[in-house]
Image (cartoon, helix red, strand yellow):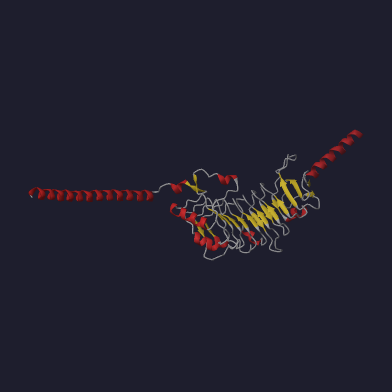
Amino acid sequence: MESVLRLQILLATAFGGICGSTLNHRCLAGSEAFACILPMFDYQPGEDIPVFHIPENVSVIRFVDPLYNVHETDNVIQVYDLVLHRQLNSPRAIELCDTYTTAVEIPPDLEYAEFSYDSIELLHVPEHPPSALRYLDLNGNYHLHPANISRLVNLETLHLSSCSLETLPAGLFRDLNRLAHLTLSSNNMHTVDLTVFPVSLTLLRLDGNWMTKFQLGSSVGRYPLLEDLNIEHNDLTELDMHALVAVAPKLRLFSIGGNPLKRASLSGTLDTLDKLHIAYYNMELPRDQVCDRGERRYRGACIPESVFTLEWTDWLELLFLFLGLVALLIAVSYGGAILWARFQARSSATASSDSSC
């Protein structure tokens, strides 16, 4: 009887420990003193509130996939909200990437947030008090509605690459007067108006879109701090370098590779950039040193082969040139034949007069 009672107590303790472990979470061994690495877990607002055992000096939380799944759960944090943030002791930095998180509520005291390659659609940003967020990475969220980003008035870095954006919401950057780095690479934008961006930018990436038009505006010196502008791999055929230099007088790197620029203007564009000491290709990363398939390195930049392929207008020009040369040759031959005939006639006349004497 006593052994049976002990077994029941043991089972109850084990069961309670298992149930409790689903709600109690600890930092993984090896976490930094100021950072806590937590295995992901199931969380849905309104359900059981998780409990964390996190040291007081921790200011950074990073979520990772569990090494093993004991409880056969999905380990999905559906929403990162204020309740979860408070349970985590209100960290200043959060990294929750490559998950199925669908919504994020930005806490007022959060300063650094990386939510890349999640499934975020909604971004809740309270109007008051102003958010302290300075860094926000939302790359790879294909269904994102970014309008509320306009309330993050203290943002300095914003990543919105690979978000399937076709247009930018009106007024998105109107109040982001501290924004310095903005990446909008690999979206689906066909036209971009440079005047919608804040004047505080030092770096702007628009590469990998479908841009056929790049509107610079006419405000001289509008972007006095802009040094790095990337428009690689778009569909631009012409660039107004004089307007660009007027708008961004401190530009130092203007990456233009991968655009089907008209061959007639390509050399002139590169000559202008060389004259102004503005680099037009990047060699910092190993992938920058190799051109993509269908590209040719031309004066350091990777240019599509199509730029160097003769079009029908080029062939027409060559045809007219050939016909002109043929016509010129015929005219020269005809003129030469006439002159030769006259020379022969004059020679014959001279010979006849000499013989008569």
Extreme front residue here? Answer: 357
Residue 340 point in image, percent of width and height: 20, 48
Q: Foreground: 162 or 125?
A: 162
Q: Foreground: 22 or 271?
A: 271
Q: Foreground: 328 or 54?
A: 328
Extreme bottom residue here? Answer: 219
Extreme right residue here? Answer: 2
* Count of marks overlaid on the render: 0
Q: Is residue 1 visible?
A: no
Q: Along the horizontal axis of the image, is 129 left or right of 338? A: right
Q: Residue at 67% x, 53% y: name it.
A: 103
Q: Is residue 2 visible?
A: yes
Q: Along the horizontal axis of the image, is 236 left or right of 135? A: left
Residue 46 point in image, percent of width and height: 73, 52
Residue 357 point in image, percent of width and height: 8, 50
Looking at the rendering, in which quadrant would you find the N terminus?
top right
Residue 17 point in image, percent of width and height: 82, 42
Q: Along the horizontal axis of the image, is 200 left or right of 112? A: left
